[in-house]
Image (cartoon, rainbow, N blue to C red):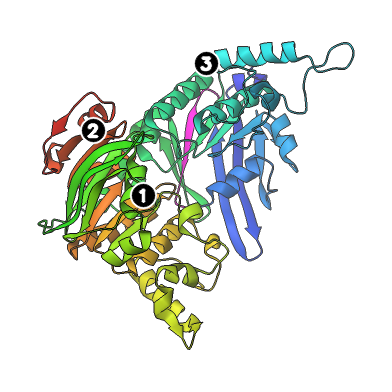
Amino acid sequence: MESKATAAGVPRLELRRASKSFGRVRALVDGTLVLWPGEVHALLGENGAGKSTLVKILAGVHRPDGGEMLIDGNEQQFVTPAQARDAGIAVIYQEPTLFFDLSIAENIFMGRQPVGRLGRIDHDAMHRDVAALLASLGVDLKAERLVRGLSIADQQVIEIAKALSLNANVLIMDEPTAALSLPEVERLFTIARKLRDRGVAILFITHRLEEVFALTQHVTIMRDGAKVFDAPTATLTTQEIVARMVGRDLATFYPKADVAPGEVMLRVRGLTRRGVFKDIAFDVRAGEIVALAGLVGAGRSEVARAIFGIDPCDAGQVQVAGKALAMGRPARAVKAGLALVPEDRRQQGLALELSIARNASLTVLGRLVRFGLISTQREVELAGKWGTRLRLKASDLNAPVGTLSGGNQQKVVLGKWLATGPKVLIIDEPTRGIDVGAKAEVYGALAELVREGMAVLMISSELPEVLGMADRVLVMHEGRITADIARADADEERIMSAALGQANIHLGNAA
């Protein structure tokens, strides 16, 4: 489906020095990007670098203040998303927006269903077209199936099929893998490679650098609203990309603290919840980071929630600093010295409409009461203390926490729980959805905590993070711990084998 211009060596899409301001905030200063047909192009940068604004300009959501855009060598100006769609640009977001009570076919052809002679929707024709689209992507989904109940990965496939039905030749994937398991990521990459081989230009946005090398052919890096670097992926290293993005060497990216483990702070024995996990047993010592790894659905988060008392369990015991913990009582868990930073910070960790200061102090409000009223001054002081320690970037602690970037929101959740003075920190997916710079700061905070003697149980789906930060790796498969791997023996192949149930390795000191 190449145009004459593209066949003659003209980029599929070119954005030249685009700019965009919102009031006094210059969100985009120099949005420059070149996408070629048959190429997967990575767009990288920290949160606030201008990536989202650039994507919204390409998608017709924002109209640029300056610059120009060319599609197949022809200048274009989009005023609406419909115009971008008609020009062949489609965006696949991290969380698709589909109609759950309609079928896959109805979602793909929403608003443009084929009709028969009497003006009625031709369901047979629609189902045939959708079945052909799905087959071309190599996925086993039925056109007639309702969207409700489908995984995020399958929903993304539907969005991709919709884009192909609209003859899209520029596909923008905005952090599509953040909520996917490793097999789902690989399936998405297989689909992306098929589209690339058909001549589609793909813009791929991610915070996971390993995905850049696995999928893309070219990299553009943005910082402070401007393009600062671009080069073929094959010419780059992870160290170079990090340095271009945040100006820090990868050697300091995982600041693993060299601490001799102390007394057992968290002891779990025989923890069982029928149908979810069984006979979970491990120790976490003071000054130690123990990672809980495994595929999505292995039961890792459920174990953490049961330890903290949010979810019930059928059997088992938990001890904190040598004292038995009453199960099913989160308030008792906090009092005993447990803290839990949940996986979904926006839904489970923050009250987005409340201020940064209020969110940072929610776990210790009782300490801030004077004469029956919460002292806002003491709230701000507490938030300021933890904000300074965690390098929180916020100009006004009284602003709603929802205005912060993902990385800074994670720091508020972390600070909220550290304010309780815990002995054991359970942190679920500590860097999901945050940029490289914020990741390094979260890792630095964890390293500092274990140096001070805290015990950390870290649940993570990112293998580089597990290998970079953990003293020991516990691997779960279908609700059981299948491996306990010492740091010196840990590698990606060993962890993945255990996660897939192909190994039963006991190399560390778990009971």
Foreground pick, 241 / 69:
241
Name the residue type under label 1.
Answer: Arg
Query: CA separation, marks 1 and 2?
Result: 23 Å
The residue where tag 1 is placed is 305
Q: In this view, does 192 lie above or below 365?
A: above
Residue at image location 13% in from the left, 37% down from the top: 489
Residue underneath mark 2 = 495
Residue 168 in sight? no
Could you tell me if residue 310 is visible in this image? yes
Q: Measured along the vertical axis of the image, is residue 50 above or below residue 154?
A: below
Foreground residue, 298 or 49? 298
Q: What stretch is highlighted in magenta?
A: 37-47
- Verify CB contact (< 8 Å) between mark 1 and mark 2: no
Q: What element carries label 1?
A: helix
Horizontal arrangement in the rendering, residue 486 relative to residue 86 (left or right): left
Question: Which residue was labeled with disc 3?
Answer: 140
